């Protein structure tokens, strides 16, 4: 994994909990887990497509379409999963994020408000999809943990 962020490199290196790295559009997901002889089966789940081993990064490659399902399966099995993906620093949060049902989040909340309903506070709702598109895309991570009941 390339990058200048030491924290992201450390998360990737440890892979505990597992890591899903969502790269730029058109590139497969990179999935890294601590070694186990059944990692292929864990990553594949019930999918017909077979994950591919990436020798360079020592991880599995899967289709991007597996993102939500794979994150949920790894979360259930390991009790947590790191999601590393691009976001834009100046992007703002909006009702579209608060009411989302999937796990993919590109706004500046990095998933903190994702699917939460209204997060409270003094949000000024301009529209369902209000967002700024400033700044370059950068990689960031979030640790997805099971929802407490």
Image: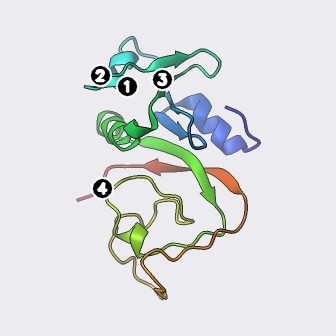
- Select label 1 or label 3 by which is in front: 1
Label for residue 43? 1
In the displayed structure image, the side of residue 33 where residue 147 appears, left or right: left
Q: Earlier in the sequence, mark 1 or mark 2?
A: 1
Identify the colour scheme used.
Answer: rainbow
- Select label 1 or label 4 by which is in front: 1
The kind of secondary structure element at disc 1 is: helix
Question: Against 111, is 4 above or below?
Answer: above
Identify the residue position indicated by label 4 in the image: 147
The kind of secondary structure element at disc 2 is: loop
Q: Earlier in the sequence, mark 3 or mark 4?
A: 3
Q: Total label count?
A: 4
User: Which residue is at a point 38% across and 17% down the rendered structure image?
Assistant: 40
Question: Against 146, is 43 above or below?
Answer: above
Q: Earlier in the sequence, mark 4 or mark 2?
A: 2
Image marks 3 and 4: residues in contact by CB distance under 8 Å: no
Q: In which image quadrant can residue 9 be found?
A: top right
Q: CA distance from mark 3 to mark 2?
A: 23 Å
Image marks 4 and 2: residues in contact by CB distance under 8 Å: no
- Select label 4 or label 2 by which is in front: 2
Q: CA distance from mark 1 to mark 4?
A: 22 Å
The kind of secondary structure element at disc 4 is: loop
- Select label 1 or label 2 by which is in front: 2
Q: Position of residue 134 (x, y in %)?
A: 69, 68
User: Which residue is at a point 28% across and 57% down the rendered structure image?
Assistant: 148
Identify the residue position indicated by label 3 in the image: 34
């Amino acid at each position: 994994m390339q990058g200048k962020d030491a924290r992201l490199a450390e998360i990737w290196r440890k892979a505990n909990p597992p890591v899903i790295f969502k790269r730029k559009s058109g590139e497969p997901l990179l999935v890294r887990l601590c070694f186990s002889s059944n990692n292929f089966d864990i990553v594949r789940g019930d999918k017909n497509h077979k994950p591919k081993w990436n020798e360079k990064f020592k991880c599995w490659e899967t289709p991007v379409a597996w993102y939500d399902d794979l994150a949920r399966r790894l979360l259930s099995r390991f009790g947590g999963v790191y999601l590393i993906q691009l976001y834009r620093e100046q992007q703002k949060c909006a009702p579209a994020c608060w009411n989302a049902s999937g796990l993919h989040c590109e706004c500046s909340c990095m998933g903190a408000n994702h699917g939460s309903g209204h997060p409270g506070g003094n949000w000024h709702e301009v529209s369902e999809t209000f967002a700024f598109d400033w700044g370059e895309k950068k990689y960031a991570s979030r640790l997805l943990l099971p929802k407490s009941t």
